[in-house]
């Protein structure tokens, strides 16, 4: 969903129409308050296009709220306000696009900008795997009714904690914007924004990933979610589909930094393979039954 | 607009429009000079240079020295240092500081749109350097900024040149930022001369090759 924020009803309607014509699902509002409600109410926010001057604040306020609620969303200031009057000094870490409405064919340019940003997801704070689109497509085939798997995966994560003398273990699927956990032992993990999870980086590698101390790694040292969960040590092996797509990870954690030797890496890889096998068997069963998850 | 960006006098083949390069190497050993020189293009090309730690006048001098012909109609310097640009033969635009990544990105988009309106469809973009940005913002924020900038350069068929001094950062930081760029140019001081090596770019030699940083 694209949220289009502009107090000028005619201009907003024209912008929304241009985006809708390009095939996007657009929602229109005219103030910071209404935009905030829409951002907080909707889970599927892909993009915000906002004017700068709003009756109850600034478009930058809207973009900050969007960045907070949906960190991967494309944020665009589409405005009559000249760039010299846009004061970004206090929101330097927001990162957003600027497009002046006074440009020739401004709405065509906006559609092109939004189209590219959503296709390539280029406002994420983390690198995407080269095969991201195929990976997400593969993931969708395994995500259906994962509840039936809990027992099998819970046994594996429990075994992992004992095997590695680790405090916690989990099996997580990394979807387009979040990691969702199919099994957790020793730690309670809700869905995490993708930019907050170590697994986001782990799926970039085909091999086992080991972070001996998250506080001593520039990618995670400022990560408040990890700190709050008390996760210092991290190791994971990718869950790889038969076609070679990394759809998630089998991971172990500890609150103390530690090391992980080659044999442990090998064993973690075996656990990941076993978890993936369970997912694959469930998927095939659904296909045979003619249910969801078929190719 | 399918012609690649060329680099006369350097041991690099033309590079496909839309590509961004991470240039890595010790700043004082030629990597900065090389990165600036990669912006030297044909007269129909424009250049946008983001300077994070040098005054606009110094940046313009470096451009001239490295063979980048500057002129207000085809060169823009985004200055994060706070100089007014008086006497500089280029457009100079102020950004509040190197921690204002939003301001750099938005100003960049606006300047680029201006060049496009004036018929400069081909734009080379230089950022000198990511090392400064990393000393003011965390890796996650710099990652988002780089991802967005590189995406923008890709969408407008530009050329991006981003400089980083790997000696100042953890190897995982450099690797993460490199993952947003299509290619990487490494620079080192060889026995008799400076050397460069391309990584991740099709149609480029993968060996170390000598180069002379100064144009003829």
Image (spheres, rainbow, N blue to C red):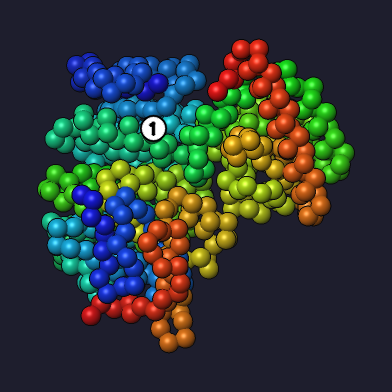
The residue that appears at 43% across and 31% down in the rendered structure is A73
Question: In this rendering, is residue B57 above or below B109?
Answer: below
Relative placement, left or right, of B160 versus A165 is left
Quadrant in the picture for residue A250 = top right
- Kind of element beneath mark 1: helix
Can you give x and y, in whole percent of width and height, for residue A219 in the image? Answer: 58, 49
| Whether residue B140 can be seen here | yes
Q: Local crowd at mark 1 within 10 Å, few (<14), some, or many (≥20)?
A: some
**Can you say which quadrant of the picture contains the C terminus of chain A?**
top right
Quadrant in the picture for residue A270 = top right
**Can you say which quadrant of the picture contains the N terminus of chain A?**
top left
The residue that appears at 51% across and 65% down in the rendered structure is B166
Can you give x and y, in whole percent of width and height, for residue A192 in the image? Answer: 61, 31
Q: Chain of mark 1?
A: A
Instruction: Tell me the residue that label 1 is attached to.
Output: A118
Can you give x and y, in whole percent of width and height, for residue A266 in the image? Answer: 77, 48
Question: In this rendering, is residue A57 above or below A91?
Answer: above
């Amino acid at each position: 969903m694209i949220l289009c924020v502009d107090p000028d009803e005619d201009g907003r309607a024209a912008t929304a129409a241009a985006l809708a014509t390009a095939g996007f699902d657009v929602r229109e509002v005219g103030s910071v308050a209404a935009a905030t409600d829409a951002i907080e109410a909707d889970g599927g926010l892909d993009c915000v296009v906002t004017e700068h001057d709003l009756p109850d604040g600034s478009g930058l306020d809207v973009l900050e709220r969007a960045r907070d609620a949906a960190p991967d969303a494309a944020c665009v200031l589409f405005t009559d306000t000249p760039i010299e009057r846009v004061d970004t000094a206090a929101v330097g870490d927001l990162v957003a696009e600027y497009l002046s409405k006074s440009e020739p064919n401004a709405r065509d340019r906006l559609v092109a900008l939004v189209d590219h940003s959503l296709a390539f997801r280029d406002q994420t704070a983390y690198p995407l795997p080269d095969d991201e689109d195929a990976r997400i497509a593969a993931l969708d085939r395994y995500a259906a009714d994962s509840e039936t798997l809990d027992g099998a995966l819970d046994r594996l994560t429990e075994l992992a904690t004992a095997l590695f003398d680790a405090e916690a273990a989990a099996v997580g699927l990394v979807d387009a914007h979040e990691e969702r956990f199919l099994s957790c032992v020793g730690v309670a993990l809700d869905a995490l924004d993708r930019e907050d999870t170590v697994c986001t980086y782990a799926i970039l590698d085909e091999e086992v990933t080991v972070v001996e101390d998250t506080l001593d790694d520039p990618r995670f040292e400022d990560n408040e979610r990890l700190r709050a969960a008390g996760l210092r040590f991290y190791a994971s092996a990718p869950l790889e589909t038969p076609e070679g797509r990394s759809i998630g990870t089998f991971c172990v954690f500890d609150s103390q930094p530690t090391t992980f030797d080659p044999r442990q890496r090998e064993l973690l890889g075996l656990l990941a393979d076993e978890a993936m096998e369970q997912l694959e068997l469930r998927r095939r069963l659904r296909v045979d039954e003619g249910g969801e998850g078929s190719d | 607009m399918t012609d690649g960006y060329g680099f006369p006098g350097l041991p690099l083949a033309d590079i496909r429009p839309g590509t961004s390069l991470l240039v890595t190497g010790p700043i004082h050993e030629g990597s900065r000079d090389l990165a600036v020189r990669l912006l030297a293009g044909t007269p129909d090309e424009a250049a946008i240079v983001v300077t994070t730690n040098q005054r606009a006048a110094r940046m313009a001098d470096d451009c001239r020295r490295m063979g980048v012909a500057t002129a207000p109609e085809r060169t823009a310097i985004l200055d994060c240092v706070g100089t007014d640009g008086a006497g500089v033969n280029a457009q100079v635009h102020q950004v509040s500081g190197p921690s204002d990544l939003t301001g750099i990105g938005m100003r960049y988009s606006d300047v680029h749109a201006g060049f496009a309106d004036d018929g400069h469809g081909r734009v080379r973009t230089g950022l000198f350097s990511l090392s400064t940005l990393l000393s003011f913002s965390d890796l996650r924020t710099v990652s988002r900024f780089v991802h967005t900038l590189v995406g923008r350069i890709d969408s407008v068929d530009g050329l991006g040149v981003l400089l980083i001094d790997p000696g100042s950062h953890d190897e995982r930081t450099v690797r993460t930022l490199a993952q947003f760029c299509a290619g990487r140019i490494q620079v080192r001081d060889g026995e008799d001369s400076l050397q460069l090596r391309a990584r991740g770019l099709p149609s480029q030699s993968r060996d170390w090759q000598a180069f002379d940083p100064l144009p003829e």
